[in-house]
Image (cartoon, helix red, strand yellow):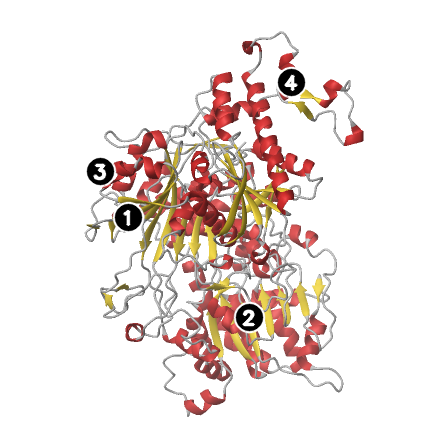
Amino acid sequence: MAGPSEDYRSSLGNDDIKDQEDAHESSNTVDKSQDTEGDSMAHLASNSIHRSSSRPQLDLSKAAIQGNFEERDPTILLPNQSDDISHLALDIGGSLIKLVYFSRHEDQSTVNKRKKTVKQRLGISNGNRRSYPILGGRLHFVKFETNKLNECLDFIDSKQLHRSDVDSRHWGAESPNSQPIDNAVIKATGGGAFKFADLFRERLGVSIEKEDEMDCLVAGANFLLKAIRHEAFTHIEGQKEFVQIDHNELFPYLLVNIGSGVSMIKVDGDGKFQRVSGTNVGGGTYWGLGRLLTKCKSFDELLELSQRGDNRTIDMLVGDIYGGMDYSKIGLSASTIASSFGKAISENKELEDYRPEDISLSLLRMISYNIGQISYLNALRFGLKRIFFGGFFIRGHAYTMDTISFAVHFWSRGEMQAMFLRHEGFLGALGAFMSYEKHGLDDLMVHQLVERFPMGAPYTGGKIHGPPLADLNEKISWMEKFVLRGTEITAPVPMAKPGTTGLGGFEVPSSKGGTLRSDASALNVGVLHLVPTLEVFPLLADAKTYEPNTIDLSETGELEYWFTVLLEHLPDLVDKAVASEGGTDDANRRGDAFARAFSAHLARLMEEPAAYGKLGLANLLELREECLREFQFVDAYRSIKQRENEASLAVLPDLLMELDSMSEETRLLTLIEGVLAANIFDWGSRACVDLYHKGTIIEIYRMSRNKMQRPWRVDDFDEFKERMLGSGSQKPRPHKRALLFVDNSGADIVLGMLPLARELLRRGTEVVLVANSLPALNDVTAMELPEIVAEAAKHCDILRRAAEAGGLLVDAMTNTMDGSKENSSSVPLMVVENGYGSPCIDLRQVSSELAAAAKGADLVILEGMGRALHTNLNARFKCDALKLAMVKNQRLAEKLVKGKISTASANMNRPLNLNCFPVCPLDRSFDETLQSDSE
């Protein structure tokens, strides 16, 4: 056993295992989004940015916009920018090369007058917000076998990763701006950083700068545990459970890296660690003995054998010694292994008489139990409660994780848990990348990372891998080769083009078969989008205990039900998406590719629900929207939304006139009924589509409103009325600022939420309309809202004055009389984006614009099933909150709102948490449609 006194630099170089898979590229990427908070390029260019030296330094002098200034997303050139973000880092072990490389691009967001006015109103200054463009890009993870080093070098050369000014658009060809770097340096760790340094210099003209392996290992683990919400998980008896760890409680912990050998490291903080123990019995031992005893040709083949094995034919169990009985006095069950391979000494058998499957499992359990026990003893020695296991030995293998978990649980008597990491194999390579002084990731926060799963990512943990190229046509071509056979989607297996290294072709499936249903034990990692502008919603009562998802998909039948709903709605969604792009041949090809890709995602998740991390209904709905965008369907409901907006705006004046004729109390009830009635409009629902043929929008709206007889299924309106209008001698206290989270386009926003916003404005309350940043189904977006408000303001002075005050009417109407006075005295109506492109919302990650607006708000109104039922039903806030939704799904009506939902006491001295959830009054069920399930 490697003791604590050994030099870790000589032993840790073996922390790798043999992997016989072909080199493949994972689609894990960190996508750094842009946040341009400067009011103009002149402002950006004239201000010096003072930041820590560990971040990329941007020289904004002589910055200029390339191309037309009227372009929505112009390219901004930084001609004097000299600092480069380094392109790649490697961990070159004895068996595997792990490579992390960065591809950068620049993408500027639009800075418009509306945002400028909102920032001024909300008190957002450039002093406390980023006012410089952040270099965008992706962080990719790739692995190669060390004995195929030339393939790794070809890969680096083909993507020009050793050159400067490279972006993904020019991969595979000479970039017009790429230039060789004199004395270029690549960071690397592992024994191969010394062994192959001359080869890198000869082939690529670069120098290898060696980084300490232990430093890299710890840095990589710390980054992942801080940056990825569902990085760590437990695995007990085949069940995965993701663990959320508070950053303030992360340290100290024990990191056990299992490669060919095993290192055990006590981590006390960033850069603070000590290798306290280790063992030479690790992955290399398993592979080496397994190869001798079973004749397996690869490590994965050996693991596959263990899945079919029975170790009882070889291992001596406690029951074998005690006549099938437990040794209960010391807590040993009859099935506990007393001696690994113990039966072999008492049986007159030769090696050939034992099944290779049984040998593999016995060997696996022997080594895993040993590692688990030594890890526990070291944790006990230093008083550590958390043990994280990493390294390519584990690779998401269920038996391995179960065995280690059992050992830790057994020896600690349940006081400790073994935890595993989704990115287990890339700790060293990622740490080497982090060692660059200017990587810009040093203060990354968990709420600034959003994980996505583009096509290709779902299969990197199994046997089938997606297209490595980012080109859309390549991706579509790849998807077109899939063949649906029964319930399985079979992958294509074309060979690589002649003269290539295979990196641009497709991998031949292993003996497991060529389906997209990869190993049930495999875990996947996706695209990590770094979005510096995301923040935690400041009005959450307790952000640490907040869980957005209401429905637990792990409950019996839930996952199957929602997968069925999603698949049944898929053809209709494809039709709308294709129609939104003009129904062209190209749109049809993309639509078909989207359907195949999304079906493949669902097949993968049905096989292994935890494959992408903790799974909730919100994640499924978001996955669908991301998949649409991946195949460049930006807004599938564009034409439908426009048509519904126009029809609803045409009847708005009549509705406002009707409302103004009512008493205050009647008007308030009518407004809430109006929001709920308008939430029934749903073009994704066949029942709603039928309604459109029976009358006008205003007729359907009134019919829906009239059918909602109180009391509703969940009805807190009386408490809300008391808060708004007062009671007895208690006078009403107007709210200062209300955040209205809006839902659908058309009647929902025009006839429902805008009249409610108008009433709040009438009472002197500032109103902020919170809408999606990107399209999702027929949800209204923050980009679309100003035009809708401007049209509505033509019929209402209250809306007009508030919209002008809030910057929504940038060009004031010519018929405004004394507009400056009206502006100065009017409360504003503003629009902010929420940072999402999904029917649901996770309030742990919202736009900084919304977070700023929330700091002055004392009323939150969440509207729609996605934001008020599917997510946030159980959310509690520091201020008054009202959740409104028409329950259009009978299953949800029975499951979530079968009884009265408990609310806070209607005490005016404490925040109210109120709900109004009527069940859809239409005769036809909405169960069959997805749109109704997500609104």
How packed mark 4 is, by other alpha carbons closer than 10 Å (few <14, some 14-19, many 20 or more), is some
Graded by Cα atoms within 10 Å as few (under 14), some (14 to 19) or many (20 or more), the crowding at tag 3 reads few
Spatial CA distance of label 2 from label 1 is 52 Å
Q: Is residue 899 left or right of residue 653?
A: right
Mark 1: secondary structure:
strand
The relative height of residue 382 versus residue 195 in the rendered view (above or below) is below
Residue bearing the label numbered 4: 342
* Residue 217 spot, x, y in % from top left: 46, 45
Q: CA distance from mark 4 to mark 3?
A: 53 Å
Q: Nearer the viewer, mark 2 or mark 3?
A: 3
Residue under label 3, please give it: 202
Circle 1 is placed at which residue position?
185
Q: Quadrant of the C terminus?
A: bottom right
Depth check, front residue: 774 or 647:
774
Give the quarter of the image for residue 111.
bottom left
CA–CA distance between discs 1 and 4? 53 Å
Quarter of the view holding residue 641 = bottom left
**Label 4 vs 2, first from the N-terminus:** 4
User: Which residue is at 44% across, 64% downward?
Assistant: 533
